[in-house]
Amino acid sequence: MRDFSYFRASSVDEARNAVLQAGGALLAGGTTLLDLAKCGVAEPATVVDITHLSGLGEINVDASSAVIGALARMGDVADHTQIRAAFPAVAESLSLAASAQLRNMATIGGNLLQRTRCPYFRDPATFPACNKRNPGSGCPAIGGVTRNHAVLGTSDACIATYPGDLAVALVAFDAFVDLGSRKVSVDDFFLLPGDTPDRETVLGRGEMIVGIGIPASAAARNSTYLKVRDRQSYEFAAASAAVGVELEADGKTVRDIRVALGGVATKPWRARAVEQALIGKALDVETVERASGLAMEGAVSHGGNRYKIELAPRVVARAILKMAQNVGGLA
Amino acid sequence: MTIMETRKHGDASDGMIGGRQTRFEGQLKVTGAATYALEYPVEGLAHAVLVQSTIPAGQVVSIDTSKALEAPGVLLVLTPEDDLGLTTASDWHGNRPENQPYHPLPREVRFNGESIATVIAETREQAVEAAKLLDIVYAEAPSVASLDDPNAGEGKAVDMLNVAWGDAEAALAAAPVMIEAEYSTPREYHVAMEPHGLTVKWDGDQLTVWEPSQWSHGMARSYAEWFAIPYENVRLISPFIGGGFGSKGAALAYSAVAAFAARKLGRPVKLAVTRPQNFTSYGGRAATRQTIRLGATEDGVLQAIVHRGASETSTYADWPEQTGAATSILYKVENFSSQHRIVPVNTVTPGALRGPGKNPSAYGIECAMDELAWKLGMDPLDLRLKNYADRDYQSGKPWSTRRLREALMEGAEAFGWSKRSHQPRSMREGRTLIGWGIGCGTFPVIQAPSEAMIRILGNGRVEVVSGAIDMGQGTYTILAQTAADVFGVPVSQVDVKLGDSRLPGSAIAGGSMLAGSILGAVHKAATAARDELIGLALSDANSPLRDTGANTLTFGDGRISVSRGEGPSLTLPELMAALGRDELEIRRNTLPDGATAQEHHQAWTTMAKVRGPTMGDYSMHSWCAHFAEVRVDEDFGTVRVSRMVSAFDCGRLYNPRLVESQWRGGIIMGIGQALLEEGLVDQRNGRMMNSNVGDYLVPTNSDIPDIQVISVGVPDFNASALGGKGVGEVGIVGVAPAIANAVFHATGKRVRDLPITLEKLI
Ligand SMILES: Cc1cc2nc3c(=O)[nH]c(=O)nc-3n(C[C@H](O)[C@H](O)[C@H](O)COP(=O)(O)OP(=O)(O)OC[C@H]3O[C@@H](n4cnc5c(N)ncnc54)[C@H](O)[C@@H]3O)c2cc1C
C-alpha cells in the first residue's frame, strides 16, 4: 500500500474540511475502504478517521421515525429492539449482510457507500479500462463474466450492481440521508450510471453522511427483507426484495405497499410499477405474481446474469405473499 | 512385527492406538502459540512480492524497473532479464534433465496470472507499492482460455489411461437398456486457510526454509538441486501447516525466486503469496468433462460401461485429472472401455486436490448409475447392490478388503433410505422440494516407506522423531498414541517432533499414504527400542529386573514389570536410572533390509518407492457410500443439504475422532464442490475473475448440516502394518454425485455440470 497521511477528526466540520484536501477519504469501519486500497482501486492521499466522533453512533426510534447516526454499527442496528419491531426489513437487511465480524466493524454511513463487487472494477492491474475508475475508458465487464451484474438501470458505460442490502430496505420506506446541511431521499442519493458511472451518489466534495432517517409507517412495521443466494450466508444477493404491506381496514385491500429490489440493479431499486399494480387490490397468488413481473420492466441481460430476470420477480412475489399472510390478507 | 490391538485392559485410554485422543497440537493452535512459516521472527528480513502477468500468453518484451528501483525501501527487482543461475530440479519421480537452466520468472507468459517479476524491499508495503511502478511491455500471443474455449480442440490422448476389457461397444449395442450422458466439472481450488509463502535464509551455503510443506524431504531436494548444493545443506522447517489438500507438496517457482533473492541480498527474505495470487501460483483441480454410456439388462445387470473423459492441462505440462479412475472399479462389469484426453489451455498446470482423479470420476459414474436406475425404474441402492463388484475387474485381483456393501447397507439403514419414494418431486414441504441421493466413493491404498526415530530419555519421556508433517490431519497425535501404546505410558509422556527435513525421512502427506507408512516405521522403531530395553533390563548387572528369571517384560500403565506373577516393577525413568542411561535412541525404516544410502535418499525425496493399489497380490482401496438429503426452493432454485449420512470402509482407525474429522472435512469440501465452487474464467483473456474468498465461495457453517459418519471397516494388514487404509482423500469422493442425485430426486431436473447453482434449476 502506498503512503498516505492519517488524520483523526475531532468534529464533523474538521472531518469535512480534511476531506476537501485532495484525495481525502473518510475512514469509518474501513471494511470497504481498506479492501479497495488492497486491490488498487482506492488510493487516498489522506485518510480521515471519523470513528472517534461522538454523537454519530446513536439509534433513536420514536413513533414517527428512526434516526440512526452514520457511525452506528451494522450489527447494533440489526439487533436494536425498536428497529426490529418498527422496521423489520431494515434489521433483516443488515443481519443477512456480510458476516458477523464485518457487521461488528462496519458503519451505516460506510455501508451505504460500499462499492460494487464487479470483478473488473476490482482488478485494475488487468483491466485498466473501467468507466467507473477511469471515465471514458470503456467497460470490460460487458462481454465478460457477468453472473453478478445488474439487469436494471444499466447503461452502455456500466453494468455494475449496487451490492448493498441496507439501502434496498431504506429506499423502500422513503428513508433519507442526512448530510448535515441537507437531507436527500435515498432514492435520489444514488445515481444511475448513465454516461458517468464514476458518479455513484449526489454526495458533494466535502460532504459527509451524518445519519439516516426512516419515517415510520404501517408498511414498514409489516415488512421483510428476503435475500436469495447460493450460499446460505456471507454472500451478496443474487436477488433480494424489501417489501412492506399495509391493508385497509377491510383486512383485504392494499392501502400501501413498498417494493424494492437488490442484487439486480445499478442502484437500490424501488419497484414502483409493482406497487402501483397492487394498491387497491386484494392479494392473491396470481395477482401478486403478475404484478411482480413488472419489477423487471426494462431489464437487460448480459448473458451470465439472465437468470436474475427470472429470479427477481419470484423473490418479490414470495416476499409480498409472506407479508400479506402476516397480516391475514392473503386471499 | 507385533500388531497392537486396542487395549482390553486398564482404562481403555484414549491415548492408545484406536483411542479418541484429541489433537496433540490443538491447544498450541487455538492459543496462537503454533508458529507458521510466515511468522518466524527472523532478524533483518526483506520482503518480496510477486508480480503476475495480466495477459494469457505471449512474451515479456521488457520491464522497465527504473521507477520501482527508485521507490523508497526497494532493494532488488527481479525480472525475466535476470539469469538466476538455477538448474531445473527433478520431477516427483526423480527424473531430472541434465543441466537444464531453470527460469522461475519466465520470459514466455503461458497463462494469465503467471509470476513474471518480484520486487524485494525493506517492508512488504514498500514492495507492493514499487511493484505497481514496473512498466511491463508484452507481446501478446493467441491463447486458449479454458476447456470451453472453441479453440481448445480435442487435446491429446493419454494412452496410459486407456483401460479396456471385454467388448464394451458390442455389449453396449446389444444391451436392452442404455443411458448416455455428459458430465462436467469446473476448475476447483484448494483454498487452504493458510496461504502459500515462505521465509528463507542463507548462512554461507546452508539454506534454511520455513515453508508450509506436505513433504519436507521432497521439497528440500528441489532447493538443493536448483542451487546445486548438497541436499544436507538444505533445511526445510514445517512443523505446522494451515491445510494443504494437495497444494503444498512441491516447492514452486516463487520459492526459488525468494531463495535466490535472499542469497543475492545476503539477507533473509519473506515472500507471502497473496490470496488472489494463490489461485494462479499453483494449480487447482482441472476442469473436466466426461461422457458415460451404460448398458444393462431390463432387470439392471450392467452389461457395459463406455467412458470418454477429458481434462484441462496447461500448455507446458501434462496433468491428467483421471476421469476414469473410479469408473473401472466401482461395479461388476464384463465389458469396459475408458479413455482420457488432456486438453492444453493457457492455465497454470493443474494439480492434486483432495481425491484427485477419483473425485470427478466418481461424480460421472455415480450420476450415471442414478440415471440408469431411474430409466430402469429401480431403486438406486438396489442397482448398486445388484452390480456389486466381487473382485477388481480391471486388475483381475481379489480385493484385500472391500466393505462397500456394508457401507451401503449400514448407511442406508442409518439414513432411513427404505422410506424413499421412487418418484422425483414426491417429497415437499410447501415450496421446498426434498430429495435423497446416493453416491459411492473410493480411493486407492498407496504405500510408501518411511523412517522414524525413537528416543527414550533418562527422565522417562519418549520422543518420536520424524520429518513427516502434520497439516491438521493428526500425525502428531497418532504417532504419540503409537509410542504410548508400545511403551505402555500415557500420551502426556510422549513428545513428537515433526516437519523438518533434517529429521528421519518419510512419505509425502498426500494420496492418503502418510499415516499407514509412518505408523509402520514408528511402530517398528518403538518396538525395537522396547526390545532393546527389555534386553538391557534382563541382562544389566544393575537392573532390579535381572534376577527375576523372566524372559520378557510387560510395558503397561506406566510401568515395566515381569509378565506374569510377582516381582519388581519399575517406571521408565527408574529403569533408565538403574541402567545408568540418559538416553536410548533407535532409528528404523520400512525399506527392505540392506537398502543403500542412495536408495534411502531416493525413498524420502522422490516417489520412486511408492506402490500402487494393485502392485501386490490384492487390489486395495478405501470405500464409502454417501447418503444426502437436499432441500430445493422450487422458485429460487437454491439447494441446501439438510442431512448427510456417510459410511466408510477405511480399515482400522488409529484414532476415530481424527478420522471422523477427516471424513467430515472431505464431505464439507464435497458440498462446496457440488453447490458452490467454480473458478470463473474470462474467455477473452483467460483471467480468473473470482480469485478471492469473497467471490470463490466455499461453504460456511450454515451451509453444513448434521453429518453422520459411520465406520464399517475391518483391519486390513495387506494395506498397512497396523491395518489402516487411507482416510483423508476418500471422504470427498462421491459426495457431489450423492447431492446431484438428490437434487434430481427433489426436482426431476438432472444438472450435469457442477456446481449446481440456482440458475441451473430455475
Ligand atoms: C467479504 C464481504 C462481504 C460483504 N457482504 C455484504 C453483504 O452481503 N451485504 C452488504 O450490504 N454488504 C456487504 N459487505 C459490505 C459491507 O457491508 C461494507 O463494507 C460496510 O458496510 C462498509 O462500512 P464501513 O464502515 O466499513 O465503511 P468504510 O470502508 O469505512 O467506508 C466506505 C466508504 O464510505 C466512505 N464513508 C464512510 N463513512 C462515511 C460517512 N459518514 N460519510 C461519507 N462517506 C463515508 C468512505 O470514505 C469509503 O469510501 C461485504 C463486505 C465484504 C468485505
Image (spheres, helix red, strand yellow):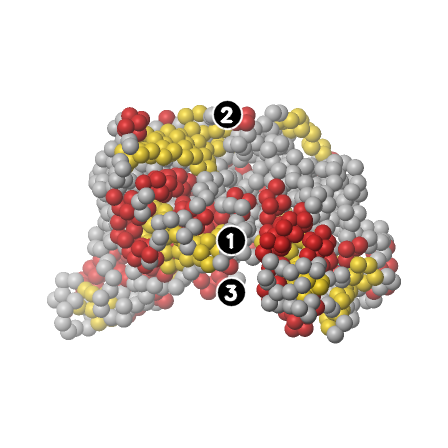
The residue under label 3 is B31
Q: Where is residue A219 in the image (x, y as percent from the top left)?
A: 69, 65
Q: Front-most of B138 and A159?
A: A159
Q: Does the residue labelled 3 lie within 8 Å of ligand 1?
A: no
Mark 3 belongs to which amino acid? Thr
Find the distance from the CA under tag 2 to the CA under tag 3: 52 Å
Q: Residue at x 59, y 48 (%)?
A: A311
Q: Quadrant of residue B121?
A: top right
Of mark 2 and mark 1, the one earlier in the sequence is 2
Q: Which chain carries label 2?
A: B
Q: Mark 3 lies on which chain?
A: B
Q: Mark 1 lies on which chain?
A: B
The residue under label 1 is B633
Find the distance from the CA under tag 3 to the CA under tag 1: 41 Å
B294 with respect to B145 (left or right) = left
Q: Does the residue labelled 1 lie within 8 Å of ligand 1?
A: no
